[in-house]
Image (cartoon, rainbow, N blue to C red):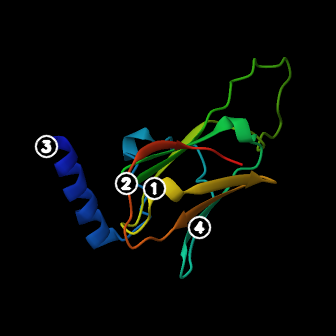
Amino acid sequence: MNNRKQEREYHSYLRTFCGDFIDIASPYDRSQSLPPTPTNVLETDKGYRIQLALSGFRKNQIHLRVEEDVLLISAVVEVQKKEAFKYHKHEIFSCSFEKTFLLPEDVSDDNIKASFRDGLLNIELPKSDRPTKSTLEISIH
């Protein structure tokens, strides 16, 4: 119980100084060799939308989970056996990744919706006057 209270206080501190939608993943979890995942965060009167460009991924490889005010986006790619040829240039590849966002306080976790089409993941985060906070998996349509 005390740990959850400390976590909420920490999230409040982050919101005060860094704003909403800060990527709160530990810097020790990130690989320096991976390019950042292109991300947009939009706001309307009714809610927020997070868009991630995930070309090369299939819908069944992408997982979304929300825990209280934290959204975890991950994609898992099985490592293929190395083929017996030599690359002269190797820029097209997919690898597993994880991205974590601190969500605004006015988002109701139970109403988050996600869709994936043509390499673009859209996550809809409706605003609410009485937001509920949950721990749940979010299905992608």
x and y, in percent, of residue 69 in the image: 37, 55
Circle 1 is placed at which residue position?
A: 109
- Between the residue at mark 3 and the residue at mark 4, the CA separation in whole angstroms equals 32 Å
Furthest residue in direction left, as rendered: 2
- Between the residue at mark 3 and the residue at mark 1, the CA separation in whole angstroms equals 22 Å
Residue at 73% from the left image edge and 52% from the top image edge:
116
x and y, in percent, of residue 27 in the image: 39, 47
Q: Where is residue 43, by image quadrant?
A: bottom right
Q: Secondary structure at mark 2?
A: loop
Circle 4 is placed at which residue position?
A: 49
Residue type at numbered disc 3? Asn
Of pointers 2 and 4, the one earlier in the residue sequence: 4
* Towards the viewer: 121 or 112: 112
Mark 3 Cα-neighbour bin, 10 Å: few <14, some 14–19, many ≥20: few
Residue type at numbered disc 2? Lys
Circle 2 is placed at which residue position?
A: 133
User: Do callouts 3 and 1 mark residues in contact (Cβ within 8 Å)?
Assistant: no
- Between the residue at mark 2 and the residue at mark 3, the CA separation in whole angstroms equals 17 Å
Of pointers 2 and 3, the one earlier in the residue sequence: 3
User: Do callouts 2 and 1 mark residues in contact (Cβ within 8 Å)?
Assistant: yes
Circle 3 is placed at which residue position?
A: 2
Furthest residue in direction front, as rendered: 130
